[in-house]
Structure formats: C-alpha cells, structure tokens
Amino acid sequence: MRRVVVTGLGMINSVGHDKESAFEALVRGECGIDTITLFDPEAFSVKIAGEVKDFDPKTVMDPKEVKKADRFIQLGLKAAAEAFADAGIDDSVERERFGVSCASGIGGLPTIEKNSIVLHERGPRRISPFFIPSALANMLGGFVSIAHTLKGPNLGSVTACAAGTHAISEAAKTILLGGADRMLVVGGEAAITGIGVGGFAAMKALSTRNDDPKHASRPFDADRDGFVMGEGAGALVLEEYEAAKARGAKIYGELIGFGESGDANHITTPT
C-alpha cells in the first residue's frame, strides 16, 4: 500500500511573503486586513481586504513573462518555488513522475476585468493575446510545471473555497494509484478587483466593517457580518513515502485520509 507524505511547504499572504514570516506574524497576532489599495474602493460598500503588499513577481519570473501571467499565477509561482526549495528537490529527482495539482477558486479575475474594459472601450482587436492563457485557472499548473520542469500529471481544481483541498486530494489519489511519485500542489487567488469585491458584496457575503478592518473577520462571532476577501497562495510537495525516504527527505507529516461530499442544498448555503 502506497503512502503519501508532505515534504515541502510554501506560502505568501497578507502577513508574510514566506512560510516563516507568515507563521511568525500569526503567532504575534498580526492582521493583514486594511483599506483596499489595488483599486479605488470609494464607490463600494466594502472597502477592506487582505492584500499582499510589496510583492515583486520578477523575483520568481522572468520580467518578460510577468505580463503573460495573472496575479494569482504570480503569487502561486512564489509559493510553489518556496515549497520546491523547502523539499530539497535536486536534479537527481525524476521529473517524468513528478506532477502538479493546482487550484484557484476563480482564476484570473483581474485579467478578465481588464480585458473586458479594453473590449468595450477600444474594441476586440486590442484584447491582449495573453488574455486567455493568463485568465484560465489551470494555467497556474502550467506555469509551475514549466518553471520546475515537472512532466507528470497536470491537474486543476476550480471549486470555489474548496479548490485547494480538492487539489490536495487529487494529488494524493494520483500518488496512491501510482500515477506519480511526487506532486507539487499549489493554490493561488487574487480576486481583489472591482468586479470581484463588487460581486461578493452584491451577495451580501462580505463584511462592511470598513472603519475597523483589523476586527472585521470574525467568523465565529455572533455579531459577524460576512467574510473579508484576501489574496495569496499556498503550496506543498506531496511524495510517495518510500520515494521520499529513499532520497533522505525531511517529512513534515503523512496524509492518511481525505473525504469529499456535496450538501446538495443551495448554491451558496451549506446544510
């Protein structure tokens, strides 16, 4: 019976650009929620979010490639690079049996919004040739596989808030069934745009505590009034246990099970 273990971790979010700084910030009780700066929120009922500040995608991408990738892809590449390095993967590790399982709840919403404006203001001939490959959610997996020459299965999960968890379970299944020995799992999201915030606000899903952003996210409070949108990415390397042990990898833990179900109740409200 094959086993699945975790050997690498990476993340970037509103409180840190790597797993160590993010964890330390959380331990200190820091909050990354503040007034939105990625667009002008003045006309919106919701004016707060958890943005990733001071992120330079050129730290993980060729400058010429940056314009080809939506922000969720850029953030995902950052987290994936950290997880890959953390796992200690070197050139001796076989790439043909090393796959990618990516996830995004929405995909390239900033790219979609930008090109929709271009279409209506300047016409169809001015739409970017990078629009489609930048907006597709599964292209996160494509960019990651190219960056690290991973030639195994390349999977994509686009299932809203469950996407990241689905990506982990799909990667684990692939390893357990013998389709790969290693999978780089990465989820990225960057939907802090006018249409993203406006859309969730129209659903009455977002907190409107604009005057108290640090205390707006309170999911278990009786006085809660919605969630706060954030952005970022997380990644982990999953390996078949014997393969990880053979190369002397450090093992964070073992994935011993997972489950999947649907409530079949309502499009936004679980049972």
Image: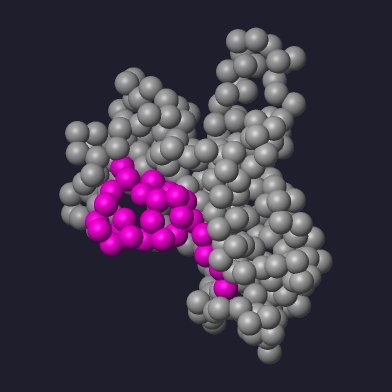
Residue 149 location (% of width, % of height): 76, 57
Asked if residue 131 lies left or right of residue 269, the reply is right
The quadrant in which residue 236 appears is bottom right
Residue 268 visible in image: no
Q: What colouring does the structure picture have?
A: one colour
Q: Does the magenta stretch include residue 32?
A: yes
Where is the C terminus found, in terms of image quarters? bottom left
Q: Relative to the observer, which residue lies in front, 106 or 144? A: 144
Where is the N terminus found, in terms of image quarters? bottom right
**Above/below status of 200 relative to 176:** above
**Above/below status of 224 relative to 167:** above
Numbered marks: total = 0
Magenta extent: 7-33
The quadrant in which residue 89 appears is bottom right
The residue drawn where x is 75% and y is 60% is: 150
Q: Relative to the observer, which residue lies in front, 21 or 143? A: 21
The quadrant in which residue 54 appears is top left
The residue drawn where x is 65% and y is 10% is: 122
The residue drawn where x is 56% and y is 26% is: 113
Q: Relative to the observer, which residue lies in front, 228 or 205? A: 228
Residue found at the far top of this picture:
122
Q: Relative to the observer, which residue lies in front, 11 or 217? A: 11
Residue found at the far bottom of this picture:
1
The residue drawn where x is 61% and y is 78% is: 249
Residue 118 location (% of width, % of height): 62, 16
Asked if residue 42 lies left or right of residue 161, the reply is left
Residue 266 location (% of width, % of height): 45, 52
**Above/below status of 42 relative to 69:** above
Q: Does the magenta stretch include residue 72?
A: no
**Above/below status of 247 relative to 184:** below
Residue 54 visible in image: yes
